[in-house]
Image: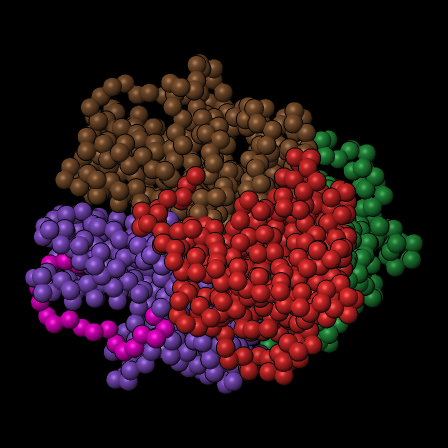
Chain colours: A green, B red, C brown, D purple
Amino acid sequence: MNRDQYLTMYAQMYRIRVFEEHVNELYTSGKMPGLAHLYIGEEAVAVGVCQALRPDDYITSTHRGHGHCLAKGASADRMFAELLGKAPGYCSGKGGSMHIADQERGNLGANAIVAGSTGIAAGAAFAAKRARSDRVAVCFFGEGGLGQGILYEVMNMAALWTLPVIFVCENNLYNEYTPYAETTAGDLLARPRAFGIVAEETDGQDVRAVHAAAGRAVARARRGEGPAFLLCQTYRFLGHHVGDVNRGYYRTKDEEQRWRAERDPLQILMTWLIAERIATSEECARVGEQVRAEVAAGLQFALAAAYPDPSEVDTHVYA
Amino acid sequence: MNRDQYLTMYAQMYRIRVFEEHVNELYTSGKMPGLAHLYIGEEAVAVGVCQALRPDDYITSTHRGHGHCLAKGASADRMFAELLGKAPGYCSGKGGSMHIADQERGNLGANAIVAGSTGIAAGAAFAAKRARSDRVAVCFFGEGGLGQGILYEVMNMAALWTLPVIFVCENNLYNEYTPYAETTAGDLLARPRAFGIVAEETDGQDVRAVHAAAGRAVARARRGEGPAFLLCQTYRFLGHHVGDVNRGYYRTKDEEQRWRAERDPLQILMTWLIAERIATSEECARVGEQVRAEVAAGLQFALAAAYPDPSEVDTHVYA
Amino acid sequence: MTSDPASTVVATREITFGQAVREALAEEMRRDPTVFIIGEDVAEAGTPFKVLSGLVEEFGPARVIDSPISEAGITGLAVGAAMAGMRPVVDIMFGDFITLAMDQIANQAAKVHYMSGGKLKVPMVVRTTLGATRRSAAQHSQSLQAWVSHVPGLKVALPSTPFDAKGLWKTAIRDDNPVVIFEDKLMYPLKGPVPEGEYAIPFVTIVATSSMVQVALRAAEMLSPLGISAEVVDPRTTVPLDARALVDSARKTSRVMVMDEGYERYGVTAELAAVIAEGAFHYLDAPVKRLGAMHVPVPFSPVLEDLTVPTPERVVEVAKTLCGKR
Amino acid sequence: MTSDPASTVVATREITFGQAVREALAEEMRRDPTVFIIGEDVAEAGTPFKVLSGLVEEFGPARVIDSPISEAGITGLAVGAAMAGMRPVVDIMFGDFITLAMDQIANQAAKVHYMSGGKLKVPMVVRTTLGATRRSAAQHSQSLQAWVSHVPGLKVALPSTPFDAKGLWKTAIRDDNPVVIFEDKLMYPLKGPVPEGEYAIPFVTIVATSSMVQVALRAAEMLSPLGISAEVVDPRTTVPLDARALVDSARKTSRVMVMDEGYERYGVTAELAAVIAEGAFHYLDAPVKRLGAMHVPVPFSPVLEDLTVPTPERVVEVAKTLCGKR
Ligand SMILES: Cc1ncc(C[n+]2csc(CCOP(=O)(O)OP(=O)(O)O)c2C)c(N)n1
Ligand SMILES: Cc1ncc(C[n+]2csc(CCOP(=O)(O)OP(=O)(O)O)c2C)c(N)n1
Ligand SMILES: [Mg+2]
Ligand SMILES: [Mg+2]
């Protein structure tokens, strides 16, 4: 990894952070319809993984999908437009926060069904393999997805048919408002391993660790050695969705505070870059400013954009 | 185990064998409607497990369910009646081979959906636990059921809530016409273990081995120590169903012949009983004759029985 | 599966729809220790809509159970528990997620009683939601009541008022059959009993379910100054269906319109229209008009989403056309 | 989604329904290397009904794939493969098992194109069965076409003859949308083209789907000597629906009966009846009669099972009543 690559990772994480802060603000000020599930705190996972991918690799994403989408290369303007239900949005406003897809960059879409895209990711990997390409597919999902049976059906097939698919489990400790330990028995890594899938745990707050682990998994898959499973330990700093403000009944302020203070993925990378003299704090700040300006411009674009024409309502039902 | 118990196990296995031979004959001679999936060759599993149960324990069963039903104490006459669609059948002829249930003996029913009853068994175990009884529930399923996601959802909950449910996987090597190794990745026992469920493999042709393993699992569950998983290695001697006669495209005659000659559960038990001087071959033969007569009488009863009145067609849709 | 006002209630209090659901559950759980609730985030969180808040405090986590995100598994578990003598309530957070439990609902719960020749019973309730216009897009906005209404062995309730919600809930829990209850997500804050319009000779019948009853009532108010009297009929359960009430009103008014928020094609409105067309054939002055959700996946963008569901204005237009007033 | 005789076929050969399906698949797989089949026992076994026999020999196990028993998983995999440029055919052995894949069918495959604003496509076919009277009881005998017909984004085909089966199959594989094809299990051995009754002024329209077309045709033969001419109309696809053909025939005959083997309530017949009642309202002499499966789980016992599905005799009775001939 060279200096540019590190700074790109930093910029990507920063971009997600700022994007999500704007989304929160949009919601709080009544400017955004519906809800959104913010990725703040988990930036290192999407960025670490996607930096190990090529533009033509596939990803599938979740209800908490803004980070994956940006990390795979989407731009903030059309994402904001989608979240606001505007015509230039990635899905012409028909998908919204939970269904953003970005076909050109291989993002097959966020999915509002927990674990709903596990089969889709494996299917894309299947198509890649059949086409004799070396593309891989990454399936992002929250640890809550471990409750869904389809995940096991798909892991079995991925192993049987050595599909180039990487299951990235983002363990942020909560299924909505329920601690994952109350819903998840046994040893998490033993689950993929039971199917013969190599599995590894990694620190989801350390983008370098995620990137290294993802790199190994992607390389294996590209070589035709089959699927892998990455368990990324992470934390969402905010609520399950923008409206989840009073969280006292399921987790303490203290816990949140500790993660924010000690385990912020942006801080962790920046501190390391400075300590290793790869970048100065001024350089990091400059990257931040650039990103901030770009995202703000994206938001202005989206706020000014037009809504779809009402006649759009029944187009694209069928191809 | 005393002599009587061994002879009971022998009689139960024999009862299943003879019952199924009659079913095959009924089908071949055009006297039976629909299809049936025969349990011949696998008798030791149902009998070994059910002999470790009390009458008030629950079982759930599969499309290949005659053996489970008989082993849990059902009588041949009403079973034949059900298979023929007659009024005195266990389900008044509305269920047939794939849906036989016998509520009085805790048999919550065969199920024509592969793995369809895994949740039901766990639910019965849940109810038993909530009622503070020490009843347990056994969920029989074929190794093909390992492909169904619901099994993993249910194993997770069974482990989380220490439910007294025992998953009995009957690995007869085939999902219909496909060898299980082509559909099943990794290490079978590692799957339940990943959820923290104790799992054990046992020789499904040796009723004593099955009984011992089941005894351990049942005792644990009764003591409140939670679920267990039993992998029984077995083989169906005949086709997937009565009409599956030409099997050459998925398995060899030779393979079938070897299992029949060397691994017949009835032979294995009888040989041992005689070698250990627990019973003579004449005593075994006498048990066989009694069972044979009883089953034949049951068939006569069923053949002579009346069909349900047409007015029955829309009763019992709602309770 | 009806909630007869006379026999069940003294009532003048005003409570919300959400409170009505919670009260019914709490009362039944007090009365019958075999009743329990299982679902995602039902305990401390009291569901995302907070409808079940307080229940875990009263009844404890053994009876208000936070489950893994396993719709098929929890439904299966409930079927087994019901067969073994309990009365489970399964909470499926959004109606869109019954897709994941359809085998357990339609092949297991619905059929066990019949397949066992009446020996086994499955007294359970599946609680879920319907309804769009919350900007939740295509996978969180569906109204799939037609699917379960289509399956013999299931009963299906679509309460439209707090009064009915409580009554139907209590009846459902005591029913020995599997019952699926759909609640419109937007109705939880709705207060009070159904307003009763003053007496008038009706000219048009509006059959409506769930929150569409509110839309119909609003439309009826708007129609009144236009000289059109509308009789709003709420079947409350699609299974069993009170065909008589529908046909009687149709015979009286000769003009009928049927509303349900499910997709219009192959949906609940088709059945209701067919039942009315058959029962009131010689009385009808015009074909029965159907009004369901537009046949598109629910779009996210507000400007599009609002076009997909029936509104009072749409209903007024249709009623005017039906009555020859353009 | 129509199979136009003129443009596709020279044909005088007689082949079975099963052969027609196989031929269509083989031809399309030869033409397009992205087409593949995935399902349980589809390869060497060629499915339990042997419909796909020979395909694995020609196309190899990489394109005719024996899967684990994972209906949800294989459907999901197909959705992803379709989004990534392939044209998968998913074999769901019995229609009853679509219950297990409804999330992938209704929430994923059906909605991806719309939710992505038209960017992504899901060109796939789900192949499954319908139909009772095989003594297979309640979990292997259902006809669940109403469910998928209800969901926007899906197309639904119910071929009733070998001719249509081949045409609809080829059209479906080339379609850029997810298509669900239901085949009646009893129709596989059916031979030849639909017999065309001699010309006569029809008095009654019988709209029928899938194998019910055969029942309708037999009934039409039985009605002819009774002086009742029946016109049998087969919509072939429920989505899209050729409403015009139905309405035109209804306007001509003034008496209509609609048959489909799905459960009668909230089923396909309700939609068809509603469409006809609306489109031909002023032409109808009697309410549209619906004939579906009896509203019970399919019973096992032959004496009971045969009561649950429409027979030619039932159709004749209903037609006589419709025509005032009792
Ligand atoms: C099948 C399904 N069940 C329930 C839900 C409602 N739901 C949305 S997010 C969520 C929790 C997901 O937890 P996790 O997978 O850990 O993801 P996180 O939100 O923590 O990122 C639930 C239960 C859903 N969307 N899909
Ligand atoms: C969900 C589902 N999918 C497919 C089938 C069709 N089917 C019936 S039996 C069977 C194979 C079952 O194999 P296994 O579980 O090993 O049981 P066995 O027949 O070997 O006893 C299949 C695929 C079914 N009944 N249910
Ligand atoms: Mg989580
Ligand atoms: Mg097997």
Residue D196 against residue D112 in the figure, above or below: below
Asked where in the image residue C247 lies, by quadrant, the reply is top left
A249 or B187: nearer the eye?
B187
D92 vs A145, nearest the viewer: D92
Reply yes or no: does residue B147 show up in magenta: no
Identity of the residue drawn at 14% across and 47% down: D286
Where does the image place residue D244, in percent across and percent down from the top left? 22, 59
Q: Is residue D243 visible?
A: no
Tell me the quadrant of the picture where the C terminus of chain A can be found: bottom left
Does residue D85 sit above or below C239 in this rendering? below
Residue A31 coordinates in the image, percent (x, y): 56, 38
Q: Of residues A201 and D68, which is closer to you in this image?
A: D68
Count of numbered circles in the view = 0
Secondary structure of the magenta portion, mostly? loop
Q: Looking at the image, which residue is at 22% across and 21% down?
A: C200
| Residue B163 in view of the camera | yes
Q: Position of residue B148 (x, y in %)?
A: 60, 59
Tell me the quarter of the image containing the N terminus of chain A: bottom right
Residue at x 17% of width, y 41% of height? C281
Region rendered in magenta = D187-205
Q: Which residue is located at x 34 percent, y 75 percent?
A: D189
Q: Is residue A52 left or right of residue D2?
A: right
Horizontally, residue B157 falls left or right of residue B292, namely: right
C308 displayed left or right of C76: left
Q: Is residue D194 magenta?
A: yes
D28 vs D198, left or right, is right
User: Residue A270: horizontal and vertical position, in percent?
Assistant: 84, 52
Choose top left, top right, bottom left or bottom right for residue D311: bottom left
Q: Quadrant of residue A131?
A: bottom right
